[in-house]
Image (cartoon, rainbow, N blue to C red):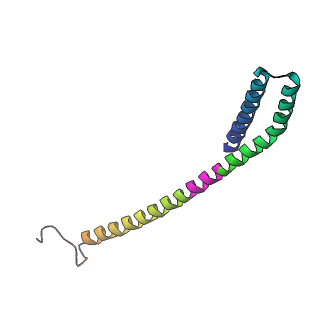
Amino acid sequence: MADKNRETFIVGVVMGAAIGAITGLLIAPRKGQDTRKILNKTVTAVPQMAEDISSSVQFQADRLSTAAGDRWHDTLDRLATAISAGIVASQSVRELNDPTHPKSSIKGDE
């Protein structure tokens, strides 16, 4: 799903850049020959631009994925610590409420 969204985004950026460049060149007051030269250079530059954008998007996606993974592991560590503390606390309460335990506080003995 994320790959499809990424591909759609990249295609949209490339198409937008190409349409914008072509529109700007066609509207600009230049000779036809000059405009054709500029269009030719632009067309040959579009694949490189697309590759650069794709690399940038991939880099950012990898960086975000790594950060999310690190946060996930931190969260799991904190959860494991909290569960361990809860187990210890539960056992302590159970021992204190056990009438056979020497440290228990039985109501009525006070």
Residue at the image position 83 percent from the left and 34 percent from the top:
43
Residue at the image position 46 percent from the left and 64 percent from the top:
80
When asked about the image quadrant of residue 102, the answer is: bottom left
Up the image or down, 79 lies above or below 35; here it is below
Left or right of residue 27, residue 85 in this image: left
Furthest residue to the left? 110
Left or right of residue 30, residue 60 in this image: left
Residue 32 at x, y percent in the picture: 87, 22
Up the image or down, 62 lies above or below 16; here it is below
When asked about the image quadrant of residue 101, the answer is: bottom left
* Quadrant placement of the N terminus: top right
Left or right of residue 42, residue 72 in this image: left
Residue at the image position 71 percent from the left and 43 percent from the top:
53
Residue at the image position 37 percent from the left and 67 percent from the top:
85
Q: Name the main secondary structure of what is drawn in magenta.
A: helix
Q: Which residues are magenta?
A: 60-69
* Residue 61 is covered by the magenta coloring: yes
* Residue 7 is covered by the magenta coloring: no
Up the image or down, 64 lies above or below 50; here it is below
Residue 105 at x, y percent in the picture: 19, 71
Of residue 14 and residue 77, the one placed in the foreground of this image is 14
Furthest residue to the right? 33
